Amino acid sequence: MDRQVDLVIIGAGPAGMAAALYASRAGLETLMVDASAPGGKLLKTYMVDNYPGVPSVSGPDLAVAMYQQSVSFGAEYMYGEVESISKEKQVTLKDGSIISAKAVLIATGAKEKQLNIPGEADAIGHGESFCAVCDGAFFRGKEVVVIGGGDSALEEAQFLTRFASHVTIVIRRNEFRASDKAQQEIAANDKIRVIKHHIPKEILLTDGKVSGIVLEDVEEHMELTVPCQGIFPFVGHVPETEFAKGLGILDDRGYVVANDKMATAVPGIYAAGDCKAKELRQIVTAAADGVVAATEAFHQITGI
Ligand code: NAP
């Protein structure tokens, strides 16, 4: 069914929900569209302990609280997969329906990067997962390998030790990228071991299920096979911005280029959160981007 609103927000993660709260509270008719449940990556995050004012909260609990607040001033959420956006601010969904808006906010975030190695295509869903919170319980008593040395990898590895017999973290350098706190936690966890200087080469499957991973030493180029039943890559993200390609507002990696008011080069089209080209991707920075974008959209639409 076609709709007409003041502001359409594509993506209902922290950026989109914060924008919806501010826009609707300011009186804009606001619609969030997402191809998943509201919450974005919060739904895949076990625990958040760096959102100001909230000492420690589960990702899904924070998502529910943000969602309830975001719709409390009249913003709406609807399920929908976006096909394209036009410069005239018409958003076309994959089911053919069109949402026309006075302003559009792109807040679609980024999805986990795959390893792109032999065996991966068959391994996904058969032992390889990108969400420890969603799938960790399937690996009770099993050997699990986590790839990557950032905050996501270390936090999810720590979470996986609730279920797995052992977790092996594989990093390609000598050092982690993650915070000191995350590094201290994994160092104190007896179930976690770390293999440094190795990159994943191939995923091995037996009877259609993950049974191991072949690693390569980045210096000596020797191969090492680690038997395991689970593989969780956390090697960064790629922005979810395919639908915006035609607008000419993406950088060479697919992130949306926007200024410090979150405005893109196309009047009335804004970007916020992890899909925006920027340095720091955190829940709080995504929410802040959303608030700035909503405020800017309000000025643009009302002239106030
Ligand atoms: P990230 O910080 O970009 O870390 C990615 C990790 O994957 C790095 O260790 C990187 O190695 C490794 N890597 C990349 N490509 C690889 C490949 N092909 N093979 C093997 N390893 C590879 O990503 P992230 O952990 O998802 O974090 C993204 C952002 O979210 C960061 O700003 C992070 O601080 C933030 N975050 C914050 C929290 C928190 O504050 N609680 C939680 C999660 C995420 P190199 O280090 O060698 O490049």
Image: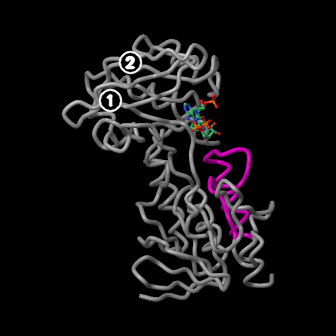
Circle 2 residue: 225
* Label 1 – label 2 distance at C-alpha: 9 Å
Q: Amino acid at mark 2?
A: Thr
Give the residue at the far left of this rendering.
207
Magenta stretch mostly in which secondary structure? helix
The residue at the point 48 percent across, 52 percent down is 63
284 in the magenta segment: yes
Earlier sequence position, callout 1 versus callout 2 = 1
Dot 1: what SS? strand
Q: Report the front residue among 255 and 204.
A: 204
Q: Looking at the rendering, in which quadrant would you find the C terminus?
A: bottom right
Residue pointed to by mark 1: 204
The three-letter code of the residue at mark 1 reads Leu
263 or 277, nearer to the observer: 277
Q: How many marks?
A: 2
Could you say whether the residue bearing mark 2 is in a helix, strand or loop? strand
Residue 2 lies within the magenta run: no
Q: Residue at x 64, y 21 (%)?
A: 180
